[in-house]
Image: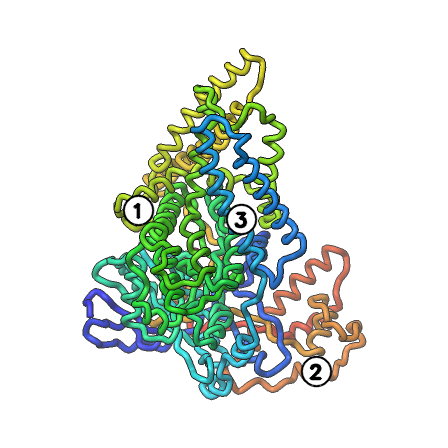
Amino acid sequence: MSRTMRAVSPAQGPADVSDGTAVPAPATTDRPVDATHVDEGHLAAPVVEREAGTRRRDLRRDAPVRATPVKAPVRLAARAEGSRTHSPVMVLLVLVATLGILFYAQFLLNPANRGDILPYAMIIVAEAILVVQALFAMWTILSGGQDPRDFDFHATQDSLFDLPEVERRGLHDQPHLWPMVVAGREVVVDVFITVYGEELSKIATTVEAAVAVRGAHRTWVLDDGRSDEVRELAGRLGARYIRRLSSNGAKAGNVNHALSIAKGDYFAIFDADFVPSPDFLVETVPFFVDEKVAFVQTPQTYGNLTSLVSRGAGYMQTVFYRFIQPGRNRFNAAFCVGTNVIFRRAAIDEVGGIDTDSKSEDVWTSLHLHEAGWKSIYIPMTLAVGDAPETIEAYSKQQLRWATGGFEILIRHNPLSPRRSLTMDQRLQYFVTATNYLTGIAPLLLLMVPPMEIFFDLRPMNLSISVGQWFLFYAGFYLMQIVLAFYTLGSFRWEVLMLASVSFPIYVKALWNVMSGKDEAWSVTGRAGKVSSPFNFIIPQVLFWVFLSLTSVVAIVRDVDNGVLTLATVWNLLNTVILSAFMVAATREARSIKRFARLAKRGVAPVAVPAAPSTVQVGPAPTRTLVSRPAPRTPAELLALEAAGLATPPRGTPLVGAAELDHAALAHLADMTPSDDPRQQARDDARRALLGAERARATGRRAARGAVPDAAAAREATDHDLTTTTAAPAATTKEKVSS
């Protein structure tokens, strides 16, 4: 075993795997985390669970939940959930868009409409790629809508936790330790967090949330950056730590190395910037009651859609995760996307581990599993929130890596090859995946058509075709795509159009690398470190912008002399405007980088403030996270709160004033014998203190409005409220870890 690889266990403390010795650590301590912050337009995790009526659901749902607040756009998160069936409007839009695609294809392929051979051929190639991809997308979308959660899933989920064992072990308040049972057998789950130089604050947020996931599991930090700070962080937060001597195989090699140590029945993978929901295992593990299921994939939802690049990159994936992936469930062709996924260990062992021969190890591993006869499940449910690339550099590296993996499948492992043991549906779906990035090269061909007409008078279509006729068929194709995107995203996202139009150099480079056998160094999208100027990564786009700008000037002068505004001029101007918007975004990003660099030299570089900071106890032992949750209130308590103006009684409770309250019942609550359990006593004291603060705020609001609440009832409410909180058992040093 490597001497540089170490594991830190919440139960054993820091352990050196190389010599097998372990140093006992003091017992872990509970620490409160503020999960009550909710900002406009953002979510705070954990999600507050619904109150259930049965004892089983009370135990499973009402216990304190350990998690870290996570910021995520409400609209995007909600839209990512999907539905069991598509709405009639959605089906109608897809059908109309499909008809528009077919009419446009017929218009282009009509020999009578052909113009000069070179620009016509460029138009046909580019539009054929787009049309084929669009038709397959429509077919996949219409095939989706079925909920993969069947009767066996719900039955397994309902009995997932071994409740008698939970009671016997005294784990009622520790849902992260509740044993999980699948098919009558207690299962072991490992949660892997892959790390390679990301910011320490991001890693801390993800590790906290992973440790807090409901259901017994072991959290492992797989550090390919070999950072002592990350090792200390993992130990402090209650996770185990693994590092290896080399970074061979990149992320796939990192996971395979961890699998040689962790021996769980299932293992989940999260990138360092994706924060899992407390319910991740509850919503995914029950699928494994089907012995053929190899992995369960959840969508990538982004919580940092603040910059132009992050919005474009994030919304670019929405249609894929909301409609395309669910549709692939129908063909057993939904593939892994590298994070927010849980695998069956036996399935990965059968195919020889995570594939290490490609930049897109996730898609290749999925393909091998499908070839071996395994089943995949995709659920359109947001169970983790992460970061989209925020800079042009990060976006370029991400797209280059993804496109390289797709082209590798197309050229080296063609899904249509008879050697592939896939069903026909799977072949077609993987072929669409492998050729998807050709749509990124199509804009390059379309950019060159207007200059060919402006400089050489080479026209793609017959001169007899009027502008109105051309626009009619053109709009039937592209306008319906925009309408469909508008329906999906809720608005027209011009950032997506801009990034899709200017990313062609990335995809050309990826295709060339695969065809020439050139190997690019593997890079992490969110890795911390010195940020380079965006213009270092967009030199081809800058050259095209200069060329199109000059071409636009020439075209305008020509049209003014001729007295006619041509379609080529309008088309070229539109392309120039799109590239100009991208240049403006790059310029702003470059200025921001320079400004931060100057501040850093002065030692006053601004620090990002998290939306909902968490409090971490620093001590020699691994720590745990507990989130406060309100306990169910009795009718008498709710009546007291209602009298004080602090709560609304539940449906069915008679509304009475303070004078009509049952004072005998309230006195009984006030004189209630204190619990013998010191933890319960601490909770009761904290509950009363919390209500006191609530009452003071309510009284202030009433006074401001000129209405003073019943003081006696308010005082009684203060004494009788039993709002749940969790008290720290010992005074320790605390530090703030930014999200």
Res 135 label: 3
Closer to the eye: label 1 or 2: 1
Q: Measured along the vertical axis of the image, is residue 558 above or below residue 733? A: above
Estimate how packed mark 2 is, as few (under 14), some (14 to 19) or many (20 or more) residues with alpha carbons within 10 Å.
few
Above or below 187: residue 365: above
**Residue 735 seen by the camera:** no
Query: Which mark sits nearer the N-terminus, 3 or 1?
Result: 3
Residue for point 42% across, 46% down: 437
Quarter of the image containing the C terminus?
bottom left
Q: How many marks?
A: 3
Q: In this view, which residue lies farthest toward the front?
A: 111
Say which quarter of the image contains residue 338.
bottom left
Q: Is residue 160 visible?
A: yes
The numbered mark at residue 514 is 1
In the foreground, 98 or 117: 117
Q: Earlier in the sequence, mark 1 or mark 2?
A: 1
Give x and y (percent) for residue 403.
Answer: 38, 48
| Marks 2/3: CA–CA distance | 71 Å
